[in-house]
Image (cartoon, grey):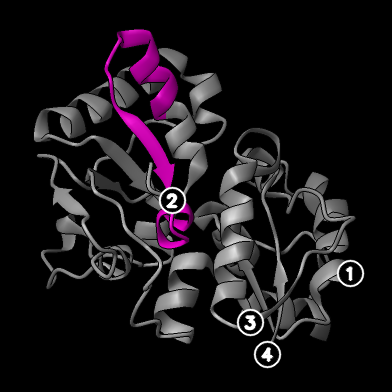
Amino acid sequence: MKIGLFIPCYIDAFYPQAGIATLELLEKLGLDVEYPLDQTCCGQPMGNSGCNSDAAAAEALFVRNFARFDKIVMPSGSCTHHVRDNFDAIPQTDEVRHVRENTYELVEFLHDIMKVEEFPWAEFNHSVGLHNSCGTLRALRTASMSELGEKPFSKPMDLLSKVKGIRFVTPKRPDECCGFGGTFSVTEEAVSARMGLDKVRDHYQAGADYIVSADSSCMMHQQGCAERAGIPIRFIHIAQILNGARA
């Protein structure tokens, strides 16, 4: 299985350690991984903002970069959601359909495709609160939604539970949006900031040393809220924990 690795813009610019951890983790699992060097944005910001036609060039480049791979993996639920469900600014050729049907967020790829049962190199002796982004929760369905009253399940929690020493805490409102929402955090800054602060406080009061997530964009927003409020909580991408980061 030949894997194409896509690293979102914000991870490339602000959290490269999450991208590096994703690559190292996939290679530890024995996968043949390639990172196309001329990759750029997947087009999600334009699509989310209602400027769908403006995403066409980014989407076309994405297809040129990744159509030759068996699976495309990325450490981002929101980008995965865009490619799989909203990648329609360009003609839907066989190559485009192949890319859309074979793009996976890291957690679902490890859980559903690779069915990883152990991470023997991983140990994380901290209390963590799990943040599921709206995209992973409600679009990719990597965890159960409390509003549906369905039987609880959590793919990221299943993976993290295989890490030695990790302890889980649960906020009072685990499914609540953190307020990032991409351009929502720009157009509704005050509401977004308050939602982020509420989210961080909820995790901190539950006893979390770290907030862990599969989406660095949400954590970037929450980290800013925590720093401005002086809340001593740390943030880490799930790929880093599964790859063996200790702090």
Q: Name which residue type carries label 4.
A: Met
Residues packed near mark 4 inside 10 Å, few (<14), some (14 to 19) or many (20 plus): few
Q: Earlier in the sequence, mark 4 or mark 1?
A: 4
Residue designated by label 2: 245
Residue designated by label 4: 1
| Cα distance between the residues tagged 4 and 2 | 26 Å
Q: Is residue 10 above or below residue 229?
A: below
Q: Earlier in the sequence, mark 1 or mark 3?
A: 3
Check whether the beta carbons of the residues at disc 2 and disc 1 lie within 8 A of each other.
no
Residues packed near mark 3 inside 10 Å, few (<14), some (14 to 19) or many (20 plus): some
Give how far across and how far down residue 120 sits, in percent: 36, 73
- Image quarter in which the C terminus is found: top left
Check whether the beta carbons of the residues at disc 1 and disc 3 lie within 8 A of each other.
no
Residue designated by label 1: 64
- Mark 2 against mark 3, which lies toward the viewer? 2
- Residue 143 showing in the rendered view: yes
- Mark 1 against mark 3, which lies toward the viewer? 3
- Image quarter in which the N terminus is found: bottom right
Q: Name which residue type carries label 3.
A: Leu
Check whether the beta carbons of the residues at disc 3 and disc 4 lie within 8 A of each other.
yes
- Mark 2 against mark 1, which lies toward the viewer? 2
| Cα distance between the residues tagged 4 and 1 | 19 Å
